[in-house]
Every structure is written in C-alpha cells, then in structure tokens.
Image: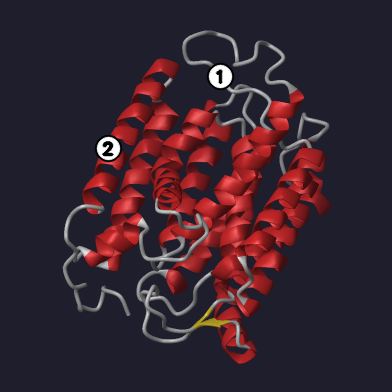
Amino acid sequence: MPFIAVFLLAFGLTLTLTPLARRWGLRLGIADAPAPRRVHSGTLSRLGGLALFLPFALTVLATLAFPAFFPASTDPNESTRRTGLLVGSTLVFLFGLLDDRFDLPAWPQAVVQVLAGLIGIASLIFIKHVNNPFTNQPFGGADGFPWPIVWLLTLFWFAGMMNTVNWLDGLDGLAAGVAAIFCLVVAGHMLFRAQPPQASVALLPLALLGAVLGFLPYNFNPSSVIMGSSGSFFLGFALAALGIMGGARMATVLLVLGLPILDVAWLIWHRVRRGQSPYQSSRDHLHHRLLDLGFTQRQIVLAYYAFCALFGILALFIDSRLTKLLALGLLTLFVLAVLWYTTRVRPTPARSDEEGPR
C-alpha cells in the first residue's frame, strides 16, 4: 500500500498543479513562442517543470517526514542520498526556470550540470562499480574504479542524462513518456530483481512515475503545456540519480534509454564534424527528422514508447550478462542504422493532420 500511496500522491498533485502552471507561465511570460525549429504554432507555457518537480519533492519529503508509514531502509546512507537527490533536483530546476525565462547561453548549463554532479557525488550517488559481462568481477576489480575515474564517470553520467532528456523533449509527451517507462523499469528492478529487494528506494521512482503520468494528459499531443528546461533538467538529473541509487546495472539503464542516448551521441559527432557547437539548437534530432519524413507526432512518440518499453522488459527478464550485452549490441546497430538512413533520405513536407506539428 505505501507504494500505491506514493504514486497516487505525486500523481494527484501533478494533475492538479499542471493547469495552474500553464496559467502562471503564460501570465509571467515563461512561454514558448512559435519558431522554425518548434513543432507548435501557438504560444505554450514553459512552466510545466514546476508541476513535475514540486509534487515529486513534496512526495519524497513526505517519505522522510513520516518514515513509520513507509518501508524501512537497511542502508544507513540512504537518507543522505535522498537529500542529495532533492538538493540537486532543486538546483537544476531553479536554473531551468532562469533558462526558460531568459534563454541563457550554453556555458552556464555546463557549469550547473557539473555542480549538480558534484552534489550527487557528495551525497554518495556515484558510479563506483560497473560489471564486466565476461567475468564475475566489476571493471577495476573488487574495489571498482579508482576515484579519479569515479568522479569523471559520474560527472559525465549526470551531464549526459540531463542533456539527453533536454534534447529528447522536442515532441509532445516524448520526454515525459520515456521517463515514465524508465521509472517503471527501475522500480520493477528494485522490487523484484534486486537481491535483497530495495523497497525503500523504490518509493523514489514510483513518486517520479506518478508525477510524469500526472503531467502527460496535458503534455501529450496536442499539448497545452510543455515542461521547459526546468522540467527536462530536473528529469535528467533525477533519472541519472535513480539509475545509480537503484543499482539497476548500467546495461539495464542503457537498454531503456539507448535510443535517446545514441541520438545525442550521433548529433554531437555530426555537429563537431561539421565544425558546429554540440549545443547548437537545430532540427536535426531523430524525432525531428522522422517528423520531416511525414510521420505524425503521435506516431513517432508511440514508436519511441514501444521501443524503450520493449528493451526495458528485456532488461528486467534477462538474467545473463552476455545476453544483455547482445541485446545492447542489437539495439545499437538498429538505432545507428535508423540514424544513418534518416540523415540521407530526402524529407517530404510534414503532414498537416491534427496529430502533426502545430
């Protein structure tokens, strides 16, 4: 019952707060106007991140304030990690609000991403061990990676996840839906696959799942509000932290989020090769190219959902590390083939039905 209660609390709060965030964003000028690289024709509130962050934070605080009602933790460091999750989420959310209002340049984003990663490390949220699929030992031996590598790997992970979710948020409901799938898979791993089960930690992805599902009715095509940088930075940081806290194995996380992660890596490589900044805004994301090829927003978003859910299910039910590695290799080959194909075919005019770009 505590798991359902956490989910419903976050879901109800977000469902109630999102219409208010929509109204406040338009009134305060925190809104997204039509532009060549946008897929909407009207002005939309960018304050949806408030309706994601605040219910999640309040729900997590409730688990800390009333511990008797929730599963007890056997890890003495768990409260430290929860605090770090909240502090880091607050930092990136507030910075995202400033970015939504003033459209900040790229370098402050990089600074904040590093600071958020440092908060995670200081709160004992870091990547120390990554399993070697060919042996029974982690890379680096039983003690894991040396600390300089731990710091670099963890900072890269946090920054990469924040950029991945931020860049994924290009179509109605895309980032929120993929985040929901991630939360469901990670919660399932914590409750049913981890040994021993991580019941107390599973409350966190369930709270985030409630928040994003409460937001989706307003954000799915045709959306009436978008999450903005505040929402995408918050989601990226939270997913990065939960992926580490859940001990869900790197292969599991990569199987769920392999498609958007590979899209980001492909974009960075292409932009650098052309002498462009990796942070340059443009319509060269995979979902934009699919839109230009004539697919509707709903078709693309539902295809992303199905792809991420399929590999998420595989990650939950596959025990063999080598089989997971094979699945990850097949995912990589398929996504790279799609990315290569969509960069070479000639786009057609976008479809103009009710599900297309607005």
Camera-side residue: 180 or 273? 273
User: Image point 74% across, 53% down: which residue?
Assistant: 88
Which quadrant of the view contains residue 56? Answer: bottom right
Circle 1 residue: 131
Q: Residue furthest front?
A: 275
Name the amino acid, label 1.
Asn
Is label 2 in a helix, a strand or a loop?
helix
Name the amino acid, label 2.
Phe
Which quadrant of the view contains residue 153? Answer: top right
Judge whether 290 appears above or below 161 on screen. Answer: below
Residue 336 spot, x, y in % from top left: 30, 40
- With 105 as the anchor, is 257 left or right in this view? left
Is label 1 in a helix, a strand or a loop?
loop
Q: Nearer the viewer, mark 1 or mark 2?
A: 2
Q: Is residue 304 visible?
A: yes
- For label 1, the crowd category at 10 Å Cα-Cα, with few meaning under 14, some 14 to 19 and many 20 or more, is some
- With 228 as the anchor, is 168 left or right in this view? left
Q: Residue furthest bottom?
A: 27
Judge whether 290 appears above or below 185 on screen. Answer: below
Circle 2 residue: 334
